[in-house]
Image (cartoon, coloured by chain):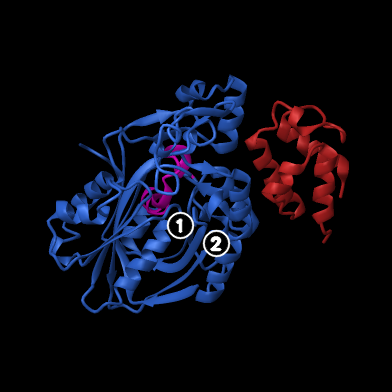
Chain colours: A red, B blue
């Protein structure tokens, strides 16, 4: 999985210039229910990955999220 | 489970909405949204306006108004109604059943079957299943399927997540036997283990109504609710719509011997435009085959989004010809139900405003 690309997509969802791996998601103003929905949709559409509601709630940093998607992502 | 019904058709359908229309641009200060937040929310959910019933107007009033329009148009006769199926989560009373109240208001014969079903967004398809089952009784030849909800009464106006996409509506649809060879293919599934994903915790008998259940609290910024309001786990519902519904639609198409190409219209329930777009993309259905404008114009009208979708977007073709369609409803329960069938030519297909 192309991690820089993933962080760029996350930045677009959060409406910020850049997201760094160590950034804590809850500290972004834009990390609300709409953003969570957008992340679930992005993971499904771009990586064919279904992230569960309880999984996304346990994620802390942007890197945790990227790792979660990567772990489930099976390249075609 | 999968099932088929032979020689049955939808002959008429009417959807009724309250005349009171509210615009997101006027309402967003209620949700404590900044202009930037409102802009983002509006864009992502394609929000524009919705219809909200005044306090005194019930779902059954909307449905009954529709029935009278069908009677006035001459496409339905009172003496031909053999059963009423009323699908709602916002009935008139805890008891009696609202279908009985409607039966009385219409002055129907004592032999008419009355059935209330507590169903939400899958309700049009599960209602169609019940109507078809009733039509298996030899004495039943016409069923009045009434779907309606005033869901706005289950949320606070200051709930930024739910209120902007909520809409109130009711529909009356006539299901009847037809001599013509027709088959309705259907699959209905339930998963009660996920019942908490969409739940009103208080106000019934598990947690009776009390001062506590009615206490309004701001549970997060811009989200005011009480224990008698609908509580949704948005992420879990999103998982459900993406993981469970598309495979069911694929299965029903295989069951009926159809392909993605042989279906002219996919009338999916519309919880919000974002989810419908994601689902269509996932199934690789061209957007032109999946109308997705209900929530922007009327709000999420629960079990009525499917008949509303047909009346709003395809009224003319449905009045004049026969079309291969797929219907899919999914939501509270959790229940998901999809059908493939021929629709049309209909005797009546309209979306109208309620007039008191």
Q: Quadrant of residue B36?
A: top right
Dot 2: what SS?
Answer: loop
Chain to which mark 2 belongs: B
Residue B112 falls inside the magenta stretch: no
N-terminal of the two: label 1 or label 2? 1
Q: Main secondary structure of the magenta part?
A: helix
Residue for point 46% across, 66% down: B339
Q: Dot 2 corresponds to which residue?
A: B191
Q: In the figure, is residue B225 to the left or right of A70?
A: left
Label 2, residues with CA under 10 Å away: few <14, some 14-19, many ≥20: few
User: Are labels 1 and 2 assigned to the same chain?
Assistant: yes
Residue position marked by numbered label 1 in the rendering:
B122
Q: Where, quadrant-wise, is the C terminus of chain B in this rendering?
A: top left
Asked whether residue A20 is in view, the answer is yes
- Across and down, in percent, residue A28 comes to 74, 28
Residue A3 higher or lower than B83, as above or below = above
Rendered residue at 59%/26% (across/down): B221
Q: Residues within 10 Å of mark 1 (few under 14, many from 20)?
A: many
**Horizontal relation, residue B238 to residue B323: left or right:** right
Find the distance from the CA under tag 1 to the CA under tag 2: 13 Å
The stretch in magenta equals B293-313
Q: Nearer the viewer, mark 1 or mark 2?
A: 2
Q: Residue at the location (75% across, 43% down)?
A: A58
């Amino acid at each position: 999985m192309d991690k820089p690309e993933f962080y760029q997509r996350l930045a677009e969802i959060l409406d910020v210039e850049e997201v760094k791996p160590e950034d804590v998601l809850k500290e972004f103003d834009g990390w609300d229910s709409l953003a969570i929905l957008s992340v679930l949709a992005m993971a499904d559409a771009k990586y064919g990955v279904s992230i569960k509601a309880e999984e996304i709630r346990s994620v802390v940093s942007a890197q945790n999220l990227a790792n979660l998607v990567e772990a489930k992502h099976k390249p075609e | 489970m999968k099932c088929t019904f032979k020689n049955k058709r939808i002959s008429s359908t009417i959807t009724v909405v309250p005349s009171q229309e509210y615009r997101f641009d006027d309402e967003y200060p209620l949700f404590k949204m900044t202009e930037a937040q409102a802009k983002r929310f509006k864009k992502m959910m394609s929000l524009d306006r919705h219809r909200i019933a005044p306090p005194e107007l019930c779902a059954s009033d909307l449905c009954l108004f529709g029935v009278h329009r069908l009677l006035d148009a001459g496409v339905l006769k009172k003496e031909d109604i053999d059963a009423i199926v009323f699908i709602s989560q916002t009935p008139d009373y805890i008891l009696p059943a609202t279908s009985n109240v409607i039966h009385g208001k219409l002055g129907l014969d004592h032999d008419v079957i009355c059935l209330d079903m507590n169903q939400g967004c899958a309700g049009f398809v599960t209602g169609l299943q019940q109507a078809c089952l009733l039509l298996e009784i030899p004495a039943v030849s016409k069923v009045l399927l009434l779907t309606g909800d005033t869901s706005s009464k289950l949320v606070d106006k200051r709930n930024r997540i739910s209120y902007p996409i909520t809409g109130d509506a009711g529909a009356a649809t006539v299901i009847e036997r037809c001599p013509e060879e027709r088959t309705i293919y259907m699959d209905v599934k339930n998963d009660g283990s996920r019942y908490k994903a969409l739940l009103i915790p208080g106000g019934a008998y598990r947690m009776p109504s009390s001062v506590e259940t009615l206490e309004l609290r701001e549970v997060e910024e811009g989200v005011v609710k009480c224990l008698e309001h609908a509580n949704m786990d948005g992420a879990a519902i999103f998982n459900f719509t993406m993981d469970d519904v598309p495979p069911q639609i694929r299965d029903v198409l295989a069951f009926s011997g159809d392909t993605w190409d042989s279906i002219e219209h996919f009338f999916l329930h519309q919880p919000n435009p974002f989810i419908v777009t994601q689902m269509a993309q996932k199934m690789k259905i061209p957007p032109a085959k999946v109308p997705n404008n209900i929530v922007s114009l009327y709000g999420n009208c629960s079990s009525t989004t499917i008949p509303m979708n047909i009346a709003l977007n395809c009224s003319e073709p449905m009045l004049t010809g026969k079309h291969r369609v797929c219907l899919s409803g999914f939501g509270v329960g959790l229940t998901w139900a999809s059908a493939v069938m021929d629709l049309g030519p209909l005797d009546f297909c309209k979306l109208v405003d309620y007039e008191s």
